[in-house]
Image (cartoon, grey):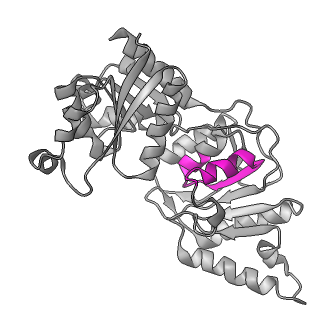
Amino acid sequence: MKKSITIWRFIDGKAGHEKQSIAAINALSKKINCEVCDIDLPAKTIFPLALLSGKLKKLKNLSKPNLIIGVGHQTHLYVLFAKKYYGGMSILIMKPSMPTGWFDLCILPEHDRVLAQKEYPDWILTSEAKIFYTQGPLVDIKERKKNKTGKSMILIGGPSKNYQWSNIKIKSQIIDLIKQNPKDKFMLITSRRTPKNFLNHLRHEKRKAIEPGEPLRDDDVIHARNLDIYTNSSELHYRKSDPEWINELMSEAPYVWVTNDSFSMIYEALSYGAQVGLLCLDAYPNNRLDRATRQLFAGKRCNWDDERNYKKLTINRKNLNEAEDCAAFILKKYEKN
């Protein structure tokens, strides 16, 4: 095998997609020297127009690729184009919008296995030997800290096509969580999907609760001084310059509680070695992400307690590190080519 390889990475501008491709490349870099060429796709430009406008001519000025990586539907045609005209092994991460057999390797989450088999007939599917199945998204783990001295985290998602969002249901679970763990310090962080009225209500009640001379009612436990509330990133201003700020917090947190609509956050917390508990929303029928989350629970990866016993968390006995396994799989296939 070569001592170094050149990787073309097509970027569609979506943070979640970029995180997965970075995780794969950083894991590869631990095993072999990598020259990485990042190729930003033209915003809101469909592939034929990008081709006709000459925006892809810059590719010929790059070093010829050994690996071509794309994440997200927008990258798929670009990956195929690059392979046809410049060579290299085509690699997709996440479920493709095209037949898997058109690509050299596909890195697919396990919960998409059945879906892919239903969408495409047998003759158009690639061999299972060319697919690497993961339990969840690839995570770039910088450091796992053994002594977790940070605050416990509460990560809030929001409305999605897979779960029925309820402000009241999530708030009541947070109240139970804090009441059962009065000595713990918590950091609640919302996401871009979190409804504004959910956060506004929490802040309003918290302000009332900290006024001098005002005793806390039982229902006001959520406003206690051991709970800090932050928006997605704007209020964590001291970390805004670091895109990995939330991963740093996860590496320090002994416990992480996540709303079960946020599968990627559940998986990232598990990858960082935290003990993970779920704040549960009702799932819509035929929900593949709900099935995947329940599989994590069945495998004793995370806590799912319908009786709301928030003091008892399942131990995450083995840290997940699928980016490393994925990199080994890619290099093994590359060596055979």
**Who's the residue at 88% across and 63% down the image?**
182
**Who's the residue at 54% across and 47% down the image?**
264
Which residues are drawn in magenta? 242-266
Up-down: is 333 above or below 239? above
Quarter of the picture containing the C terminus is top left
Total marks shown come to 0
**Who's the residue at 64% across and 54% down the image?**
258
**Who's the residue at 57% across and 58% down the image?**
241
| Of the pair 63 and 159, the residue shown nearer to us | 63
Q: Is residue 236 visible?
A: no
241 left or right, relative to 220 = left
Residue 268, located in which quarter of the rendered image?
Answer: top right
Up-down: is 111 above or below 226? above
160 left or right, relative to 89 = right
Q: Farthest bottom residue? A: 213
Residue 314, located in which quarter of the rendered image?
Answer: top right
295 left or right, relative to 107 = right
Position of residue 320 measured from the top left corner of the image (x, y, whole percent): 63, 32
Q: Is residue 314 visible?
A: yes
| Of the pair 173 and 83, the residue shown nearer to us | 83
Up-down: is 103 above or below 282? above
Position of residue 176 measured from the top left corner of the image (x, y, whole percent): 78, 65
| Of the pair 195 and 86, the residue shown nearer to us | 86
Position of residue 150 measured from the top left corner of the image (x, y, whole percent): 79, 52
Position of residue 237 measured from the top left corner of the image (x, y, whole percent): 62, 66
Quarter of the picture containing the N terminus is top left
76 left or right, relative to 203 = left
Q: Farthest front residue? A: 61
Residue 157, located in which quarter of the rendered image?
Answer: bottom right
Q: Is residue 263 magenta?
A: yes
